[in-house]
C-alpha cells in the first residue's frame, strides 16, 4: 500500500500556475525527496499535501484516505501528518518539552519519559526539555521540530527544506540525526529541498521538479546515471555534455569514440548530445608509460584550487576545441598550460537532437 | 484627550523565503473576523458621517451664515495661532531635549531621559491647573502656548530620541569624510532622517491642541473645542455647535493632509544588516552648565509647576481632603469605566489588527485607516455625534455606560491597535500551520498558540486605553451617565469653581494612574526601530 498518492494536482496563486499536473506515489516506509530549483513549486506541493493550500483540481490520498479532490476536503488538523518547517516553527511561548508534547493527547502531555524518549530519538540530551526555543541553536531547533512532528506517530512526515537555514557543518550532522530518527521510527517521509546532493543521499526515491512538473521520479542512482533529459542531468550533479554523432552503440564526440546507452529501443543513428559525468573522465599523461591511441588530448586552461579537489578547465584539441570542466582529486593536479590525455570510463548517455 | 498614533509601516521582516500570497482555503480571512472588522470600521466613521450629514441638512444659506461670521474668524485666529506656536515650541524643545540626551555628554542624561518623558503622565488640564493656581494672572495666547507646549513636547521628544538612538553614525562619518562640517552634517544628514519622527510628533501635538478643552478653558483661551462646549452647554445641540464642529473637523483633516504631503514617499531606512554602533557623543564642555540649566527649566515648567501646585494644595487641605464623600465614588467610576473601555477596545481592535497583519491588502488597509481617521476626530466631535445619534436612533443607550464606553473605544482604538499589531507580527502564520499539522482545530489553535503569544500585547494595549480613559475629560463631560462623576469630571467641577484644594487629590490620583503609561511609552520608544 502506498502511504501517499497524488494525482493530477494543479495549483496556482492568482493567475500564475505553480503546479501543472503532479502525480506522485510514496511507498509505505519509504523516503522520498523532491528536488528542484527555487520557485519550481516543490514547497507548494508540500503545502497542498499538508492542507495549507487547496489544489484546483487534483486529488491527494494519505494511505487509503482521500484528503482532497472530488469535493472532499479534510482540514490540515485532521490529516494526521507530521510537518517540519524550514525554520522549525517552534512555539516561542512553550518549552522544548511542551513543544514536543503539543500534538499528543492531553493525558500524555505530562509524560516525561515519552519526551525523553523523543529527545533521545533526535540525539538531544533530555536536559534540553526545560529550555526555551530561543536557547537552542538552529540545528537543535530543527531536531526538536522533528521530535514534535513524529511525537503523535503520524503515518507521513513532510520536511520543508529543514536543513537549508543551517550552516554547512551543522547541516550534515543535523541531516544525519534526522535521517537516523526517521529510519528508527520507520515513518514514511517526504523531503523537499533545492540541494541535489541532499536529495540523493537522504532518499530512496527522488523526484526532480522543474516549472511545476515532475520531470523524473526514481531511485537516486537512476536519477543520476540515467536522467531523462539534459536539463534534469544538469540539475542533478555536474555534467559534461558534448555534441556528437551516433553510430550503433558508439558516439563520436570531442573525447573520441564513446560507448553510449541509448534512451530506448528504435534509436536511430544521427546527431545528438553525449552526457558524461565528470568522474567518468580520467586524466592520463600523454607522454607517460601507458599512452593509448584512443585517448583524447587537451590543454589545461584554468586551475581553481579548492583544497580537497581542484577544478580544471580543459580545452579539447579535436574537433571543434570544446571546453570541459573536471574535478581532479589527488595531489598531482596538472598546472595551467599542461597538455593532458583524457580517457572515458564506462558508458555515456545519448540524447538525440531535436 | 484624543490620541492618534500613525499606523506603523508594513512589516519589513526579511524572511528567507518570500511570503506566499494569500490564497487557498487555509489563508482566506475567517468570515467572522471580516464582519467584526467591517462593523468596527463602520462605527468608527459615525462622527465624520454625523458632521457631514448635519452640515448638508443645515442647508447652504444657514451654514454660510453660521460659518462666515466674526466669532468664527476670531476662533480660527485663536486656534491657528495656538497650533502654530505650540507645534513650533514643542518641536524646538522636543528635538533639543532628544539631542541633549542621546548625542551629548550631558551629565545625568539617563535621569533626564526619563524626566523629559514624565509630562506625558500629567493630563494637560492638570498642568494648566498647576500654572493657574500658582500664577492666577496667566492668560491669553502666551499663557496657552506656555502651558500646552510644556504639556505636549514629549510627543516630539520620544520619537526623535528613538530615531537619534538608532541612526547609523557611519552615515555621519561618511558625510564628514566627504568634506562636510558638523553643522552641515546636522542639516543635510541628521535632520532629514529625523523628519518623519518630527512630523509624526508635530501631528500628534496639533491634533491634541485642536481637541484640547480643559487646559484652555481653565485660562479662558477660546478655540473651536471650547466654543463648541460652551455652545453645547447653553443651547444643548444647535446648528451653531454643529457648524463649529464641521470647521474643527476640517482643520483636523487639513492637518492630516499636510502631514501626508510633507512626509512624502521617501523612506529613511538603514541599509545593510547588523546593529548600528552607538554614535559618539558631542562634548558640551563649557556649555554643559547652560544645557543643565535649560533642562532643569524645561522639567521645572513641565513637571515642577504642576507637582508643586498639587503638593501645595494637598498640604494646605490636610488629611480631610482624602475623606471627602465624592472621592471614592469618582475613583471607582473612573476605574470601572477604564476597565470596561480597556476590555472593549482591545476586543474590537483585535479583528482589525488581525486583518491588517495577516490578510494584507487594500481592503484591510482601508478598514485600518478608517479607525485611525476616526480617532483623529476631537473628543468633543465624537461625543456630539454620539449624543445626537443616540437621541435620535437609540434613545435607551443615551447617557448609558455602553455609549460612553463605545466612544472611548473609538477615541483610543489606535493605542490598542499599535500594540496589537506588533504582537500579531510576533505570531507568524508558520506557527499556525505547525499547530494545525499537529492536530489543533482552529479554535484550539487560537487558545493554545495565538492567544498566549499575543496576550502581552493585548494587555499592554488595554492598559494604555485604561490610562487614557482615566484622564479623559471632554467626551466624559458630554457622555457620562447622569450622576456618574469620574476623577476627571470631579476635578473639573472643583477647579472650575476655583476650589483648587478640593481638586488636588483628584489631580494626584490621575497622575499616579497614568504614570505607568509614560513608562510604557518610554520603554516602547527605546525598542522602536529608527523608522
Image (cartoon, rainbow, N blue to C red):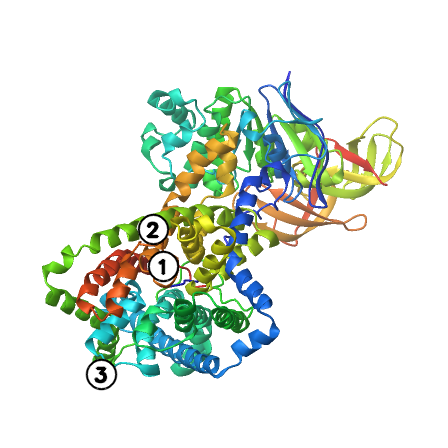
Which of A205 and B212 lies nearest the eye of the viewer?
Answer: B212
Q: Earlier in the sequence, mark 1 or mark 3?
A: 3
Tag of residue B337: 2
Residue at mark 2: chain:
B
Query: In the picture shown, does residue B474 fall above or below A97?
Result: below
Quarter in which the N terminus of chain B is drawn: bottom left
Distance Cα–Cα, label 1 vs label 3: 50 Å
Identify which residue is drawn at 50% across, 24% down. A182
Would you say residue A239 is visible in this rendering?
Answer: no
- Where is residue B84? Give x, y as percent: 42, 79
Tag of residue A350: none
Q: Farthest top residue?
A: A1
Residue with the mark numbered 3: B286
Query: In the picture shown, does residue A272 fall above or below A190?
Result: below
Within 10 Å of disc 2 (Cα), the crowding (few <14, some 14-19, many 20+) is many
Residues at marks 1 and 3 touching, judged by CB atoms closer than 8 Å: no
Tag of residue B476: 1
Amino acid at each position: 500500500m502506498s502511504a501517499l498518492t497524488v494525482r493530477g494536482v494543479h495549483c496556482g496563486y492568482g493567475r500564475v500556475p505553480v503546479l501543472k499536473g503532479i502525480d506522485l506515489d510514496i511507498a509505505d516506509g519509504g523516503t522520498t525527496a523532491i528536488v528542484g530549483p527555487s520557485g519550481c513549486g516543490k514547497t507548494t506541493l508540500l503545502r497542498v499535501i499538508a492542507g495549507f493550500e487547496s489544489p484546483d483540481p487534483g486529488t491527494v490520498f494519505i494511505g487509503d484516505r482521500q484528503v482532497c479532490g472530488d469535493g472532499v476536503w479534510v482540514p490540515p488538523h485532521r490529516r494526521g501528518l507530521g510537518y517540519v518547517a524550514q525554520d522549525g516553527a517552534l512555539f516561542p511561548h512553550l518549552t522544548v518539552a511542551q513543544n514536543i508534547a503539543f500534538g499528543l493527547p492531553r493525558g500524555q502531555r505530562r509524560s516525561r519519559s515519552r519526551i525523553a524518549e523523543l529527545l533521545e530519538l533526535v540525539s538531544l540530551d533530555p536536559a534540553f526539555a526545560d529550555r526555551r526555543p530561543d536557547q537552542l541553536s538552529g540545528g537543535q531547533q530543527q531536531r526538536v521540530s522533528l521530535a514534535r512532528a513524529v511525537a503523535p506517530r503520524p503515518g507521513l512526515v513532510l520536511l520543508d527544506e529543514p536543513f537549508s537555514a543551517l550552516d554547512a557543518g551543522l547541516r550534515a550532522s543535523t541531516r544525519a540525526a534526522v535521517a537516523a530518527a526517521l529510519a528508527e521510527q520507520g515513518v514514511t517521509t517526504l523531503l523537499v529541498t533545492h540541494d541535489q546532493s541532499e536529495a540523493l543521499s537522504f532518499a530512496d526515491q527522488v523526484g526532480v521538479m522543474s516549472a511545476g512538473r515532475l520531470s523524473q521520479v526514481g531511485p537516486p542512482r537512476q536519477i543520476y546515471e540515467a536522467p531523462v533529459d539534459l536539463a534534469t542531468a544538469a540539475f542533478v550533479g555536474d555534467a559534461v555534455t558534448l555534441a556528437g554523432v551516433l553510430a550503433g552503440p558508439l558516439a563520436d564526440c570531442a573525447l573520441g569514440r564513446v560507448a553510449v546507452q541509448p534512451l530506448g529501443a528504435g534509436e536511430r543513428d544521427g546527431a545528438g548530445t553525449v552526457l558524461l559525468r565528470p568522474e567518468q573522465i580520467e586524466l592520463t599523461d600523454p607522454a607517460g608509460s601507458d599512452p593509448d591511441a584512443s585517448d583524447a588530448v587537451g590543454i589545461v586552461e584554468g586551475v581553481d584550487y579548492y583544497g580537497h579537489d581542484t577544478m580544471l578547465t580543459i580545452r579539447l584539441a579535436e574537433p571543434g576545441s570544446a571546453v570541459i570542466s573536471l574535478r581532479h582529486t589527488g595531489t598531482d593536479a596538472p598546472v595551467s598550460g599542461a597538455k593532458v590525455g583524457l580517457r572515458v570510463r564506462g558508458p555515456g548517455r545519448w540524447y538525440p537532437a531535436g | 484627550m484624543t490620541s492618534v498614533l500613525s499606523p506603523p509601516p508594513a512589516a519589513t521582516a526579511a524572511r528567507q523565503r518570500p511570503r506566499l500570497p494569500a490564497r487557498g482555503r487555509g489563508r482566506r480571512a475567517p468570515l467572522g473576523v471580516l464582519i467584526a472588522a467591517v462593523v468596527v470600521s463602520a462605527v468608527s466613521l459615525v462622527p465624520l458621517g454625523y458632521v457631514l450629514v448635519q452640515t448638508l441638512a443645515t442647508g447652504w444659506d444657514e451654514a454660510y451664515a453660521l460659518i462666515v461670521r466674526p466669532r468664527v474668524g476670531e476662533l480660527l485666529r485663536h486656534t491657528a495661532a495656538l497650533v502654530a506656536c505650540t507645534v513650533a515650541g514643542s518641536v524646538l524643545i522636543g528635538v533639543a531635549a532628544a539631542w541633549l540626551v542621546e548625542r551629548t555628554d550631558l551629565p545625568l542624561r539617563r535621569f533626564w531621559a526619563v524626566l523629559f518623558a514624565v509630562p506625558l503622565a500629567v493630563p494637560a488640564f492638570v498642568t494648566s491647573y498647576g500654572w493657574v493656581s500658582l500664577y492666577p494672572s496667566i492668560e491669553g495666547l502666551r499663557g496657552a502656548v506656555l502651558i500646552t507646549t510644556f504639556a505636549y513636547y514629549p510627543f516630539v521628544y520620544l520619537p526623535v530620541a528613538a530615531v537619534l538612538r538608532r541612526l547609523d553614525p557611519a552615515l555621519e562619518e561618511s558625510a564628514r569624510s566627504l568634506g562636510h562640517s558638523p553643522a552641515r552634517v546636522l542639516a543635510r544628514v541628521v535632520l532629514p532622517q529625523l523628519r518623519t519622527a518630527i512630523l509624526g510628533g508635530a501631528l500628534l501635538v496639533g491634533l491634541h491642541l485642536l481637541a484640547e478643552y480643559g487646559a484652555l478653558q481653565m485660562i479662558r483661551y477660546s478655540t473651536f473645542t471650547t466654543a463648541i462646549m460652551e455652545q453645547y452647554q447653553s443651547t444643548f445641540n444647535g446648528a451653531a455647535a454643529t457648524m463649529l464642529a464641521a470647521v474643527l473637523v476640517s482643520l483636523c483633516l487639513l492637518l492630516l493632509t499636510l502631514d501626508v504631503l510633507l512626509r512624502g514617499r521617501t523612506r529613511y531606512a538603514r541599509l545593510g544588516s547588523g546593529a548600528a554602533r552607538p554614535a559618539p557623543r558631542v562634548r558640551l564642555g563649557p556649555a554643559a552648565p547652560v544645557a543643565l540649566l535649560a533642562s532643569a527649566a524645561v522639567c521645572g515648567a513641565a513637571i515642577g509647576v504642576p507637582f508643586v501646585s498639587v503638593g501645595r494644595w494637598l498640604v494646605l487641605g490636610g488629611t480631610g481632603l482624602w475623606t471627602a464623600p465624592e472621592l471614592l465614588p469618582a475613583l471607582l467610576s473612573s476605574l470601572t469605566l477604564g476597565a470596561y473601555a480597556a476590555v472593549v477596545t482591545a476586543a474590537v481592535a483585535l479583528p482589525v489588527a488581525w486583518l491588517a497583519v495577516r490578510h494584507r491588502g487594500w481592503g484591510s488597509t482601508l478598514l485600518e485607516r478608517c479607525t485611525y481617521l476616526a480617532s483623529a476626530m476631537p473628543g468633543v466631535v465624537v461625543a456630539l455625534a454620539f449624543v445626537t445619534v443616540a437621541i435620535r436612533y437609540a434613545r435607551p443607550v443615551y447617557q448609558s455606560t455602553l455609549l460612553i464606553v463605545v466612544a472611548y473605544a473609538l477615541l483610543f482604538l489606535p493605542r490598542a491597535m499599535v500594540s496589537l499589531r506588533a504582537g500579531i507580527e510576533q505570531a507568524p502564520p508558520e506557527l499556525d500551520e505547525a499547530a494545525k499539522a499537529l492536530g489543533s482545530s482552529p479554535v484550539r489553535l487560537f487558545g493554545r498558540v495565538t492567544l498566549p503569544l499575543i496576550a502581552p500585547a493585548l494587555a499592554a494595549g488595554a492598559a494604555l486605553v485604561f490610562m487614557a480613559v482615566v484622564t479623559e475629560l471632554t467626551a466624559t463631560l458630554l457622555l457620562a451617565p447622569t450622576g456618574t462623576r469620574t476623577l476627571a469630571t470631579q476635578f473639573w467641577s472643583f477647579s472650575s469653581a476655583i476650589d483648587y484644594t478640593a481638586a488636588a487629590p483628584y489631580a494626584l490620583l490621575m497622575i499616579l494612574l497614568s504614570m505607568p503609561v509614560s513608562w510604557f511609552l518610554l520603554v516602547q520608544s527605546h525598542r522602536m526601530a529608527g523608522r
